[in-house]
Amino acid sequence: MKFINLLKKELSELINKQMILSLVFMLAIFFIMGNVMKSATSEIVEEASSNKLSICNMDDSDFTKDMLEYFKSNGSKIDLITADEGDLASAFNNKSKLKSYVVIPKGFGEAVEKGEKPEVLSVSKVKGAAALSNMSSGPEGTLASITLYVSQKLAEQQGITSDQLKTIESPLTITEHTVVADKSAQISMSSIVSKIMMQNMLLPIVVMVLIMMTSQSLIASISNEKIDKTLETLLSTPVSRGSVITAKMLAAAIVALLNAAVMMIGFTSYTKGMMSSMTADMTSSITDSATESVNSLLSTGDALKQLGLQLGACDYLLVGIQLFITIMICLALSIILGALVNDSKSAQTMILPIVMLVMIPWMVTMFTDVSSLPTAAKAVIYAIPFTHTFTAMPNLMFGNTSVFWLGLGYQFVIFIVVMFFALKLFTSDKILTISLNLGQKSRFKKSSKTNED
Amino acid sequence: MANVLEVKELSKQYSKVLAANKVSFEIGEGEIFALIGPNGAGKTTTIRMISTLLTPTSGDAIVAGHSISKEPEKVRECITYLPDEAGAYKQMTGIKYLRFMAGLFVTDIEDINKCVERAKNICGLGDRLNDKIGSYSRGMIRKLLLARAVMTRPKLAILDEPTSGLDVLNAIEIRKMIKKLAAEEGMSFLLSSHNMLEIEFVSDRVGIISKGHLMVTGRTDELKERYNAPNLEDVFERVVKENEVH
């Protein structure tokens, strides 16, 4: 009953109007970002999937006319562009939505008929600095259609049938296989890698948020009690120091979980918005010839299962346990850091050690494989307990179970050690007497100097 | 008169400083005892040890039959402690704060309500109790904390500088309240204060502490007579100066 009273007080301190407002704000940002990305990517997809060929025809030969007629009869829309000769930019002035076009110069048809290699101009416009603003399939679609038509005509001239031409163009039948550990599956490596990346992107971000939020709220909770001089009163009441600290830890963990849940919902809706149009893009851009081979391929999900990369319920449970121990380490560390605080300024900087301990392994594991680092660097990175949280999922995925268990064991030992010191600190006199107050120290030095004067 | 507090040779050694050196005194039921001394004399250290916030290096104190070193949790059930310059949770309303603090001493809802009702009457903050503590003045916070310290009817209320931050009229009111609670309800008080006038008016006995030593204890009139001084301030000055000479 007394514990619930304490927990309620801690929760009411952490869950306030500002906190709820920031959660709503965070969700709104994700939602808006998701929609912006969706509309931006869907524009690109639309462009890629439409059979629109942007051509500026400057050649009046019969060959070119026939070619354009052929494109039309095959269901392509021809967008005839007018551009001044010598001023390729003028076409974009006339059509604001135009991103790229192909110029068929004078003498194009003549060159083909002579069996020469004709020249075409491919024109694209840089629209802005943003990544997605320039993301377009460019004039490739138009160029591919022209190339196909011209090569067919050239083949006809040489007496080669269209089937023979196809064989010449792609003489090899390639089936891609990807190997992970001792298993292999018939799938291209790039599709496996992109799927794994998507899966492994969300967890580290959630871990980051969880660690930051929990530490920040627990440090603030302890330091505020010290700064506002409420800690002494609280510790002189008939509740054990253990229950005071447990209530604080539990409240911080509950609030962090709440934040993580909101973050996950927001992030999922954001990636969904982006990825749904991206995958549509992928399927639409697959040409007819490739469709057959795609059908024969495994679906990515099945391939992941076959390669042993799909995590089972047991693996997720292990990741959950590791996450729990990570949070416990954070909480224990935060008790120590919170106890060192004596003024509001130092309270804000106290989270820095935890930020460093999280950022370093996060960055390292994002860009490289820790086991491939030089021995000294590897030892340093592995010594940081949070590294093992970031490597947990890949380790389980790639079957490095012994490395996973070692990491988990190491984190458990670290937790026991840090918690021991945290409890010792909180249950001793030190919680009231200890302080790491660099600002005050320097002021003290200053005043003692003036006294000597 | 049974003793509510018996302090037996209580000492506290910080890394280099001996903050309290074999301090011994006792407080009877319904008695108001004041610990006075210059800054850094060891008043707060002694009070913090009795409140079980600090563990003594040696010696012990028995509060209502419970040892502060062996049964600190039992001791905390019998005492309330109001630290000097203590604050309250700013985002809570006054009434919520009282309810929260009462809930740490008693668990029954009816008992909690009784405590809160009593505190409401004592602090005299009226409707302001429904406002957040962050909007209170220093004096209002002190009144709230004082009401909190006595609402649970502890056997021993330990008040460090009880009237600090209060204006004259409010301070007088608080002193009267302390005397009334001791006389009518048999509540014992351990006070510490710099205000000699206050001590002379409110306390039954005083203890003068200097450099960690409890120099002298006694009733104020006894001490005035012993040191041939017109008031407690002069007694204090002489005792402290004597200690400096030795």
Image: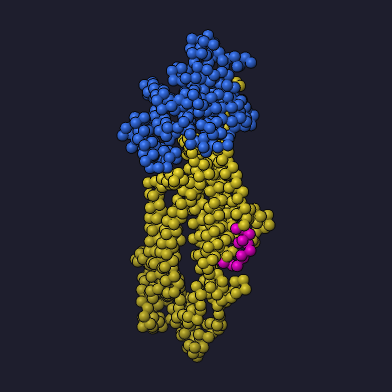
Say above or below: A276 vs A11: below
Image-based side of B92 in relation to B242, left or right: left
Say above or below: A383 vs B235: below
Image-based side of A283 in relation to A416, left or right: left
Let me know if residue A403 is in the magenta part: yes
The chain displayed blue equals: B
Say above or below: B163 vs A312: above
Chain A drawn in what color?
yellow
Let me know if residue A312 is in the magenta part: no
Range of residues picked out in magenta: A397-408
Picture coordinates of residue A416, whole percent (x, y) = 60, 50
Residue at 50% across, 65% down: A199
Magenta stretch, main secondary structure class:
helix
Q: Can residue A244 be seen in this view?
A: yes
Residue at 56% across, 21% down: B209
Residue at 39% across, 39% down: B111
User: Looking at the rendering, in which quadrant would you find the C terminus of chain A?
Assistant: top right
Residue at 55% across, 75% down: A306
Picture coordinates of residue B140, whole percent (x, y) = 38, 30
Picture coordinates of residue A425, whole percent (x, y) = 58, 41
* Residue A410 picture quarter: bottom right
